[in-house]
Amino acid sequence: MSTDVKEIRARTEIPVEKCNFQWTIENFSFYICKVGEQLKSPMFTNGSSFLTTWNLTMYPNGRKEDESEGKIGIYLTRTSSDTSAHFANFKLSFIGLNQVKQCAIDFEHLFDKPVSGWGSFDFIDRKALLGVRRATLLPNDTLVVCCELKTARLEDDLRYGTEGASPKSSQTATVSNLESLSKDFRALCNNETYSDLVLKIGDDNLFVHKCILSSRSCVFANMFKHNMKENLTNCLEINDSDPVVIKTMINYMYCGEIEGLNPEIATQLYPVAEKYDMQDLKKECVDFIVSHLTIENVCDVLLLGNLHTDPELTHAAKNFIYMNAYKVQKTEKWLNITIEKPDMAFALNRAIIRNREKKEKNLHYIN
């Protein structure tokens, strides 16, 4: 009988995603707000965890009057369609003069709810930031907030491996290869094989599949559920939007990705996503638009948000205008708003004046 001892080594790896996110806020001292008002960064994702999005939430003048008035609070916030818990290890800091990280604070938190946040309600004193620490933390009136984030999704499959065991006893479990899945579904789009619907978009025909369109949009689902013309003829004509925009939406339905997105396409894609009730695509458009505001496009974004009663677009556009009023008011698009939407222009001008008055009122203690 053999006395040899067989050695078997095993390993377990907990998948951890890492990213560094920087949020630049220009003309920070001009952002005057009440206690409890928030300023939010654009959304970002961490690695392959695309179902969970993160953003930084700032309270520039404190979160609560009896708790943190006059303190700047900063939180890492999770918004997700994924209900699984995420454990996060993250560091918040300012990147000041000469790219030096300052005021760094480490946090650990279990984000066990789809929408939740964690951070500090008194990250820094507002007077100090605008006063004695302005030169090092607020060069050129620009505040840069940095978040170094590590996350582990607790319901992810762990990765296992064994050495020395027979092939039959070796177990390997990996997280699904989402990139491969997306690639395969992208190839399925506009593939005539097994297609059961033709989309007529401009001069082009796009071969698609009712089951995929129905699973991604309740508007399409209702259309194909009943004996409507499109369902009976297996042909649907879409001629009320730019063909490039419609093709971008269909591609997103198949693979969950948007290729070649730019501000112009995003602002056209947004109402299409709303028309077909694609909330995830609509959210991606909003996040992209908000993070790409410029002097030239902010008036268009304001009108878009007003037309669709979208508070996130409207709030972001107004804040941008408040902080860049002098430049925005010199544009032709602003002039058009004053002519076509005089009530809106009047309300914005009043808010701009109030912000300037608050700024001037606070100068006595800032300096």
Image (cartoon, rainbow, N blue to C red):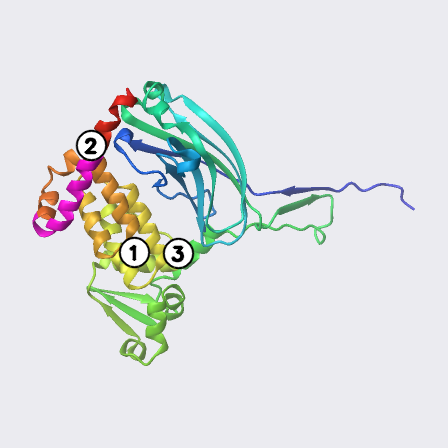
Residue 113 - label: none
Mark 3 or mark 2: which is in front? 2
Mark 1 or mark 2: which is in front? 2
Dot 2, how many residues are within 10 Å of its Cα: few (below 14), some (14-19), or many (20+)? few
Dot 3, how many residues are within 10 Å of its Cα: few (below 14), some (14-19), or many (20+)? many
- Whether residue 195 appears in this view of the structure is no
In percent of width and height, residue 114 lies at 48, 51
- Boundaries of the magenta span: 339-355
Image point 29% across, 56% down: which residue? 248
Residue 357 - label: 2
Which element carries disc 1, helix, strand or loop? helix
Quadrant containing the C terminus is top left
- Up/down of 273 relative to 90, above or below: below
Q: Which residue is mark 3?
A: 255
Q: Quadrant of residue 233?
A: bottom left
Dot 1, how many residues are within 10 Å of its Cα: few (below 14), some (14-19), or many (20+)? some
Q: Nearer the viewer, residue 48 or 355?
A: 355
> Which residue extends farthest front?
66
Which element carries disc 2, helix, strand or loop? helix
Q: Which residue is mark 1?
A: 248
